[in-house]
Structures are given as structure tokens and as C-alpha cells.
Image (tube, grey):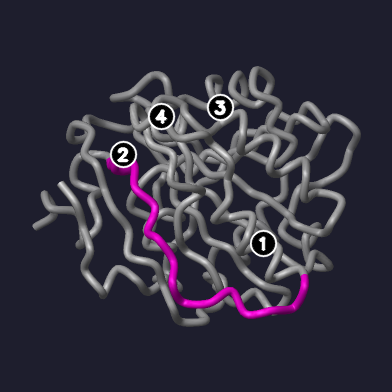
Amino acid sequence: MFHTRADRQRILAPSTLTPMISTWSRSNENYCLLNLCNLRFTPPRRLVRRTPCPKLNPIPSHWERALRTSSCPTRGGNLFTLAEFKDSPALLVAFISNRCPFVVLIREALAKFAGDYAGQGLAVVAINSNDAQAFPEETLERVGAEVKTYGYGFPYLKDASQSVAKAYGAACTPDFFLYDRERRLVYHGQFDDARPGNGKDVTGADLRAAVDAVLKGKDVGTTQVPSIGCNIKWTAGNEPSWFPTAA
């Protein structure tokens, strides 16, 4: 099932949400759990196509506040907060999965992509919002295994409450949100046109072009091919309004 409703283009930012976030960072071998909640069954996998967002929307303030106040100590005594990225000219927030074939296809390329741009100023944060009880592949422990196995050199967060995904209006994995220096959303589209089974090379061409434009201070443009992938595995009863099973 595909989704193209225009009202999902907006990033939602309800002030009452308090995300429950866990983080595992390969660079400092950090493992920190914050308020991991019990989860229940979620509907089966669906394919979801996102409509790119042409508006310049600010980063959800409640998520910025949560990362600033819910800091995780690393083994070396440092703290992971969004403030670490305050000087980065670009920020990529990627909703990904450990099991979705669309993410499995690109995960090595995503790791390389992040590494290629790390020295150019792009900050990358990945988030896993899937129901880990219904889908054991999406547990915090498996998040950490993915980091080590595929060489993710960026923080990979576990959004156990799924409130971060709701705040962003994220619908699928992968789902990419690219922000400029002022933290305005400038790109919400696909990694590239490779899909499981279509035989195309995974290059990250679309996202690379968008990041290149941001880093050069140029407009990304509003012609953006929507990302397509598996729906986020919502906990039963926690589905957002745009999900087809929501009341």
C-alpha cells in the first residue's frame, strides 16, 4: 500500500511528547538505555511511498529539547546531545530498520555515504522506531550489532516510544530528512533509485546531490523523488493518524 497524502508532508512537533530514546554509538562504544518501554504487536509490513516536502520546516523542537536534556554518558565520560551538531552545516536524520529489505539493500552504502561526508561537515543521526517486541530484529541489542557489523560511524538511536517518528511524520524505512545550517528541512526524498530486485547499483546519488547542494550553500530544489520502503512497525494502538489502520 502506498501513501501520498499531502498532509503527511509536514513535520509534526507536538510540545507534549517526551521521546524515550536509547543510543549506541560505534565511535565511543557507547551503550545507554533511557526509558525503554514494553511494546506490543504491530501490523505486518507494508510498502510506503513518501511525498517529498518542499517547505522549509524547522527541526522538531521537542526532539531537539529531548536530546539536549536526556544526555547519555559515553565510556569516556562524554555526553551525546544534539549540541554536538550545532556547528555542522548540514544534519541528516534517517529513520532506518535492521530488517526491512529496502534498508538492508543500502546499509553498507549508507555507512560509506556518512563516512564520505563526515569530514565535509554533514552530521548524521539514524533512528530505529520499530516495535521491538513484535519484531525482535529491531531490539536495542540488534541496533548495536548493526552498528558494529556494518560500520555505522554515526549515532543510531532507539525510539522506543515511537514519539520521535510521529513528531517527524516518518512513515517508512528508510525515510531521510536533510536539514541545512539553520536546521530547515531542505530534502525529504530517496537515497537513490535502487530497489530490491531492480538490479540498479546502490549509489546514494539523490541524497549525495542534495547534501552537496547544502554544503555549497545552494538550493536543493523541490523536485525530489519520494523514498519508498517498509512501513514503520507501530505498536498496536499507537499508530499515527496517517497510518491506514489508525482510527
User: Closer to us: mark 3 or mark 1?
Assistant: 1
Q: Secondary structure at mark 1?
A: helix
Magenta region includes residue 220: yes
- Dot 2 or dot 3, earlier in sequence: 3
Q: Residue at 32% x, 33% y: name it.
A: 39
Are discs 4 and 2 less than 8 Å apart at CB?
Answer: no
Nearer to me, 170 or 193: 193
| Amino acid on which the number 3 mark rests in the picture | Val
Q: Which residue is mark 1?
A: 211
Q: Quadrant of the C terminus?
A: bottom left
| Amino acid on which the number 4 mark rests in the picture | Gly
| Amino acid on which the number 1 mark rests in the picture | Val
Q: Residue at 81% x, 35% y: name it.
A: 74
The answer to whether 232 appears left or right of 62 in the picture is left
**x and y percentages locating residue 229 in the rendered image:** 34, 42
User: Closer to us: mark 4 or mark 2?
Assistant: 4
**x and y percentages locating residue 31 in the rendered image:** 69, 29
- Dot 2 or dot 1, earlier in sequence: 1
Q: Secondary structure at mark 4?
A: loop
Marks 4 and 3 sit apart, C-alpha to C-alpha, by 27 Å
Marks 2 and 3 sit apart, C-alpha to C-alpha, by 17 Å
Q: Which residue is mark 4?
A: 199
- Dot 3 or dot 1, earlier in sequence: 3
The answer to whether 61 appears left or right of 28 in the picture is left
Q: Mark on residue 143?
A: 3
Residue 203 lies in what quarter of the image? top right
Point out the stretch of residues depicted in magenta: 216-234
Q: How many dots with numbers? A: 4
Are discs 3 and 1 less than 8 Å apart at CB?
Answer: no
